[in-house]
Image (cartoon, rainbow, N blue to C red):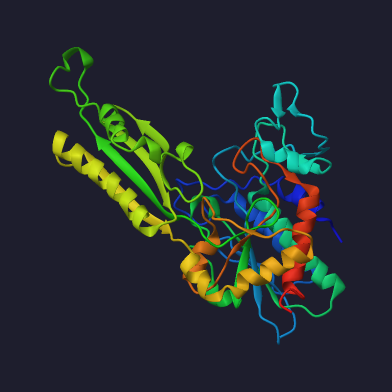
Amino acid sequence: MQTVTERFLRYVSYDTMSDEFSETCPSSDKQKLLGAALVEEMKEMGIEDARMDENGYVYGTVPGDPALPTIGLIAHMDTSPDASGADIKARIVEYTGQDVCLNEEKGIYLREEDYPALRNHVGKHLIVTDGTTLLGADDKAGVAEIMAAAEYLLEKGGSHATLKIGFTPDEEIGRGADRFDVAGFGADYAYTADGGPVGEIEYENFNAASAKAVFRGLNIHPGSAKDKMVNSQHIAMEFQSLLPVQQRPEYTEGYEGFIHLTDMEGQVERSVLRYIVRDHDLEKFQAKKAVLAAAAEFINRKYGEGTVELTVKDSYYNMKKCIEPCMYVVERAMKAMEAVGMEPKAVPIRGGTDGARLSYEGLPCPNLCTGGENYHGRFEYIPVEDMERCVQMLVKILTDAGK
């Protein structure tokens, strides 16, 4: 049997960054390269129905006791566009409490002073990068842990639930559940393996939307621009100034939502601002979208109708209302965590998962820890020992956690 670490190190060698500006599915063809490799690997393990569809979704089944529930495990193959996922130089270091030198040439260190959670991992073996790319534990750790759990069930046999495996593209850009075949998947309920530190389970997430504001101006030679030029970039900056500063993500935590400016582009005649809007509370979520709409209305009144065109699109909603009627799904996972020495802790996701959308489509789907820290950045790391414990947790969920 391959170790979960061996699998993980192989998977992160694939650059699977999704592309938020692409309209295709998957948004980047390179995601299919990992998908094809996973299908081949699953077939070699004995998963006869392993397959990838035309949209890059990977599915497979480990048959089990038909008297037990059919349980799905889901992870995503893509990595975040927030940092480079190409040419990842992963290595394993034993963490002794000292600063970890990621890149001597560039003077990049992983420091406990900057990341206090490191103190929880003294004596463990951390998988880190060279400080120039993300690691990809979000969510190749989940992929590796699911694959390791599946191989364990196939090798060891015994009584266990039927396992339905699903690996999705484009989760990082909010599209992972867009073309997921819920009916064909055939699970009674499922879990996404897409969380952070060991012991965490999440069934509350943000309500989420994306927003795009397009500003139109008029370009005139600056030498003769008086009373004629309309600079869309200045208007875009004015629009941004109308939004509440304290609702930026750098000022929020816990259940507090935010309006986050993710990127901008501009010239005199046309500028674009893109945002994501998040809040756990539906009323506050709607209020944040209303703030954007009010800012756009003000700009159009001041500079003329059509100066700004605002488009807001909901992405997913808080899955709490879907999970609360079937809390036995959460309880099963918590029992499994306790059985492998974890201390279960239900925490709200300050983000979202494929499970949020899938829960609204009739597949209850809380999110489970995978062990990683500092996702979406150059200082991402994951302890080997925590990945191994997460594999044990998944096996327990599929075997005796329901007893």
Q: Residue at (68%, 42%) from the top-left corner?
A: 135
The quadrant holding residue 47 is: bottom right
- Viewer-side residue, 207 vs 220: 207
- Viewer-side residue, 305 vs 224: 305
The quadrant holding residue 274 is: top left
Q: Residue at (45%, 48%) from the top-left corner?
A: 256
* Image position, residue 203 (x, y; %): 55, 62
Q: For the N terminus, which image quadrant?
A: bottom right
Residue 116 versus residue 208 in the image, above or below: above
Residue 302 versus residue 397 in the image, above or below: above
User: Which residue is most to the top?
Assistant: 223
Number of numbered callouts drawn: 0
Can residue 42 be seen here? The reply is no
Q: Is residue 306 left or right of residue 346?
A: left
User: Which residue is most to the bottom?
Assistant: 67
- Viewer-side residue, 371 vs 18: 371
Residue 242 versus residue 361 in the image, above or below: above
* Image position, residue 55 (x, y; %): 54, 62
The quadrant holding residue 230 is: top left
Can residue 389 be seen here? The reply is yes
Q: Is residue 386 left or right of residue 310?
A: right
Q: Is residue 170 left or right of residue 389?
A: left
Q: Residue at (72%, 39%) from the top-left corner?
A: 118
* Image position, residue 134 (x, y; %): 64, 39
* Image position, residue 237 (x, y; %): 31, 30
Q: For the C terminus, which image quadrant?
A: bottom right
Q: Residue at (71%, 41%) from the top-left corner?
A: 381
